[in-house]
Structure formats: C-alpha cells, structure tokens
Image: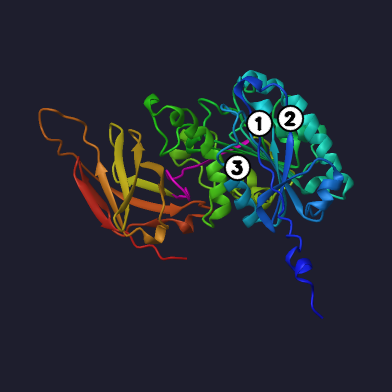
Amino acid sequence: VHKSSSTWGNAPPTPQPKCADFQNANVFEGTDLKVQFLLFVPSNPNCGKLVEGSSDLQNSGFNATLGTKLIIHGFSVLGTKPSWIDKFIRTLLRATNANVIAVDWIYGSTGVYFSAVKNVIKLSLKICLFLNKLLVLGVSESSIHIIGVSLGAHVGGMVGQLFGGQLGQITGLDPAGPEYTSASVEERLDAGDALFVEAIHTDTDNFGIRIPVGHVDYFVNGGQDQPGCPTYFYAGYSYLICDHMRAVHLYISALENSCPLMAFPCDSYNAFLAGHCLDCFNPFLLSCPRIGLVEQGGVKIEPLPKEVKVYLLTTSKAPYCMHHSLVEFHLKELRKKDTNIEVTFLSSNVSFSSRITIPKQQLHGKGIIAHATPQCQINQVKFKFQSSNRVWRKDRTTIIGKFCTALLPVNHREKVICLPEPVNLQASVTASHDLKIACV
C-alpha cells in the first residue's frame, strides 16, 4: 500500500508544549496584581504551564498525589523576573518529586516597596482561592509547602493563617523587616501559620526581620553580615542585596549538596561563639535542626517549641557548609589579667582560626571554631598567646595549659579529645602541635 506523497508530506507537526514565563512590569504600572500561577513538574522542569483553574491543572501534568511546593517571590525593584527563580525551581524538582508552582506577582510587587506591602492581603486571598482548587483535586493541606522570599514570606504567613495554620510547612527566606518588625502576628509570618514554620535570617540589620518568626529561626553568621558579601557602599546594588539574597542561595545549596547546614540553639550569637551552646538537648532533645528539605528541619519532638533561635557559621560561597568544633584551653595557674589565645586549625594549606579568652582569675576558656574540612582532616593546631602590648620591651610572659577540642554537637564528654602533652606558650610566639583525630 502506497501512501500518496501529498498526505505523507503534509503530516501535522507534533505540537510543542507552549511554555509560560514571568511577566515584566514597567516600574510605573506596578499597581495592578495580574497574578500568574506557573506550574513546573518533574518530567519537564524547564517549562512552566500557566494554570488558572482546576481544568488547567488536570491537563498540565499536575499530580494530586505528590506534595506541592509554592514559591512566592518578594518586592521587585525593576519589575523583572527574579534572577534566582529558574535555578530554584530546577533544584527543587531535582531534590524532590513534587509539583512546583511559582507565583508571579511581578506587577503587584514592583515600584515602591510600601505599595507592594499594601498588595500582600489581596495577593494572599488570590493564592487561597487557587489553593482551594488544589484541595478540590484531592490535595491535602498538610502536603502543601510554601517557600516565601523576603516579602513573599509574609504573604505565605497570611495564606497559612487563612488556612487556620493547617498547611504542612512554610519556609521564610530572610523574611522582610521593613513594616513587619513591629507588626502583629496576624500581619506577619509566625509559628502559628503552618504545622512547621522555619525562617533563615541573613540580613537582620537591613532588609530582613530581626525577630524570630517560626518554630525554628536560623540566624546564619549571626543573621547580619554574610561572608563574601561587599562590606562597603561602593559595591552598589550588590552591597544592598547580597546579604538579603544569601538565604535563597543557602537554601538552593542545601538542596544541591549533602553536607549539612546544621545549627545550634543559643540565647545569642556571642554566646554561641563563646562556646556556651554545644548541643541541641534544650529544647530539641538532641535533634539538631538542618537547613533544607528535611522533615520538620530534622527536629523530632512534639509539640514543637516556638521561636527558637539557632546559629551556624558558613563559608563565603557554595556549598557554604562548615563543621563546628569546640576549642578549650585549661591554664595550669591563675592569672591576674585576661588571657587571649588565637587557635588555628590547619588542613592541607587551608587554615581556620578562632579566639579563646580566659577571664582573669579563671583557669578555663573556650570558643567555637568553624572549619570547612572535616575534623579528622585537620592535622595541625597552632596557638598564639596575645602579648600584653608592652611597647618599650618584649613581653616574655609564658603560660602553660591543656588544649582540648570536640566536634559539635557535643552530647557527652567522651567526644572531647585533648593534646597528650601540655602546651607551653610565650607571648606573641606561634607554637604548633600535631592533631590526630580518627575519622568516624
């Protein structure tokens, strides 16, 4: 049987799926919301489908049996698509088998920050109507996870509140501070907005909120100046936004990498650095929280405590993770002044330093040292006993003591490893000792 050449030649081309993208808004027209919901599925992570109603959802590959991740961006200075969102969507879809829906509210979020804030309630209502369509399709409230960036975190909080706190999870990535720091819990993200609420704080002295707003609040590097970000104004836009956006990049990195971004509860950042908080017993009963897609952030207790501040140190670039070690120095004899010792871990050309201060008339001082290489790869420790700054003659003071270290979390003293011989230090002279810790 021969097909006629005309029929054969004119076979209709296979229709290519039409991909939808974020809108671009002129700065002067950023008043109307014009919300779009873009669905991305594991089988086609680069192609967004515009989904308005239930029929769109059913025809676009939405799978009601999977979890649903909703990404909500924040204020947009230029009215353009967020630069981080494509990578975020792809990384989420690689890390978990879920429906990912990006909420495009570029029109309502651009122009003036305060007008974007005024749009939060209107946007939250629109998202609620959309989520109700998912529930009609059989999606459970507890399988919905909202990830809100900056202002988007408070949008997520309001949506969660409208669902009576029954959504599965809200992750706030540096929730916005301006207009929200002194707002009521009804107006901002808080622990009552979902079954589990976490927030990652990276810019509390500028665009991010200073107060805890979840069950677990990560204050990364204290929550303010992030390593690798410009520290002076001349860097322009990067100076303004780098710390604030670090929360997004940390979260993406946690999804991409297996090294844990683990944090430790403490009353303050300074107390954490001084080695006063070494485990997660109180209040997490030893389950230390971790950034990323871990069930309840790795916290395994019920009911969840609220507004727990947790601290961690990071490197300046991806994958950001550091190991945290306790370092201790025990003096043989009391001194009449404070004793400051710089401690440096060395591992194949890389060094990591910290400082121990032993208060006067005390024998023991401690601190935290963060290191990117595992503790068992640290092969040397260096000490420098700080001079008392006698200008006119060399300080010949010497001290003798015992040095010990342990990897956090330190749940029991058996984990502490001490140098076998006493450490003799002379002011301003560096002393080196080999450090041998077995790999577990």
Q: Is residue 434 above or below residue 367?
A: below
x 44%, y 39%: residue: 273
x 67%, y 50%: residue: 47
Secondary structure type for disc 3: helix
Task: Write down the residue under mark 1.
Answer: 106
User: Residue 304 at x, y = what percent?
Assistant: 71, 42
Q: How many marks?
A: 3
Q: Amino acid at mark 1?
A: Ile
| Labelled pair 3, 1 in contact (Cβ < 8 Å) | no
x 52%, y 51%: residue: 409
Viewer-proximal residue among 56 and 242? 56
Task: Write down the residue under mark 2.
Answer: 34
| Numbered label attached to residue 85 | 3
User: Residue 197 at x, y = what percent?
Assistant: 69, 39
Q: CA distance from mark 2 to mark 1?
A: 8 Å
Place residue 360 in its image quadrant.
top left
User: Reading the chain from its start, which is encountered first: label 2 or label 1?
Assistant: 2
| Numbered label attached to residue 40 | none
User: Residue 391 at x, y = what percent?
Assistant: 14, 28
From the viewer's perspective, is 13 left or right of 439? Answer: right
| Labelled pair 2, 1 in contact (Cβ < 8 Å) | yes
User: Looking at the image, can residue 164 be seen?
Assistant: no
Q: Is residue 61 magenta?
A: no
Segment tinted magenta in the rendering: 308-324
User: Looking at the image, can residue 138 be seen?
Assistant: yes
Secondary structure type for disc 1: helix
Q: Residues within 10 Å of mark 2 (few under 14, many from 20)?
A: some
